[in-house]
Amino acid sequence: MPRTRTASRRRAAAALLAAVLPLTACGGPGADADSNSRKPEAGYPLTLDNCGHEVTLKSAPRHVVSLNQGTTEILLSLGLADRMAGTATWTDPVMKGLEKANASVPRLADNNPSFEKVLDAGPDFVTASFVSTLGTGGVASREQFGKLGVPTYVSPSDCAAGKDNDSGGDGSRATPLTLETVYGEIRDLARAFGVEERGDELVAQLERRVRKATDGLDASGASLMYWFANSQSPYLAGCCGAPGAITRAVGAKNAFADTHDEWPQINWETVADRDPDVIVLGDLTRKSQTAESADAKIRFLETNPATRNLTAVREKRYVRLSGQAMNPSLRTVEGIEQVAAALRDFGLAK
């Protein structure tokens, strides 16, 4: 499944607040010593409307902690590594071109860090890609951070109009996600840090890449299936998340477009009935589910009686994508490029 969940590591709220409030009363370990004497920055205080919360920043963040890889890669792409106090929750190696910048930022945990670990980094701003990361069973709630004076931000793609995060699993969408929501997140974060021009240029670059990848592409006769993880009860993409945006961009069909769940678990007999032309495989490096890597998925598909005779398997029509490309993120554009190129190579695009 797209988001990595770990067991809740909550402490008793009262004890935790008692332990950390003395730090925040002094501005927190990440605050500048002269924060009270510094002149107000132009453009601040700044308020963002985010997932039903008003996020107010008194100044540009200097010690942000990003709790999911998606927001981390946006911040790194905006050239903000020097303002990052920590990252967490990784499914893949960092995006190409960001290796050096990422190496300069502390990794607090490969999965969800504890609330205490995040606070130890002294954040003045916390970002996350998923509502669940800053909710029940996640790192801590937005309210808990708010009580300590730490503003938080969640990717709009996980709370966009039509997204229901209370429907179980990874939620469901009544309205298809569009790349405009991802671009909106980039612009929000660029504005939060006072680097609006960088945000506009990054969005423009992504838009140019999508146009180039899909120019003249017609794959209307091809059906795609997206498999994120788990071989026993596979998590396959429904109609309307990031895989849906990829499928629409290339003009193909999603084999499971009739379900609005973000990542429903669907049995292999049903997959055999749908018999997709192409299987898009999440190529993950984490180790929280079965069949995480693309190689492991291919071994399963080619040996399992229920899948080895699928058209895509017999023809070896596989597309390997990073987990981040299959989540709503700037790497969804990478997914469009790779799927479009594969469809042309397979002879399935006009």
Image (cartoon, rainbow, N blue to C red):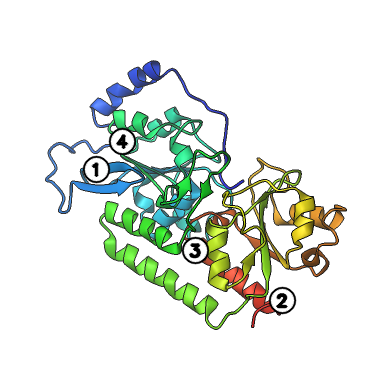
Q: Mark 3 to mark 1: distance in Å?
A: 32 Å
What amino acid is found at the position of numbered circle 1 in the picture?
Thr
Q: Mark 2 to mark 1: distance in Å?
A: 49 Å
Q: Nearer the viewer, residue 120 or 293?
A: 293
Q: Where is mark 3, residue-wise?
A: 97
- Picture coordinates of residue 319, whole percent (x, y): 68, 65
What amino acid is found at the position of numbered circle 3 in the picture?
Gly
- Picture coordinates of residue 283, whole percent (x, y): 66, 55
User: Label 1's element?
Assistant: strand
For marks 4 and 1 on the same chain, the one whose residue lies earlier in the sequence? 1
Q: Mark 2 to mark 3: distance in Å?
A: 28 Å
Q: Where is mark 2, residue-wise?
A: 346
Which label lies toward us, 4 or 2?
Answer: 2
Q: Where is mark 4, residue-wise?
A: 150
Which label lies toward us, 3 or 1?
Answer: 1
What amino acid is found at the position of numbered circle 4 in the picture?
Val
Give yes or no for contact between labels 2 and 1 (Cβ–Cβ under 8 Å).
no
- Picture coordinates of residue 330, whole percent (x, y): 47, 60
For marks 2 and 1 on the same chain, the one whose residue lies earlier in the sequence? 1
Instruction: Please tell me in which quadrant of the rendered image residue 124 appears.
Output: top left
For the point 16% across and 50% down, the residue is 41
- Compared with 123, 304 (above or below) is below
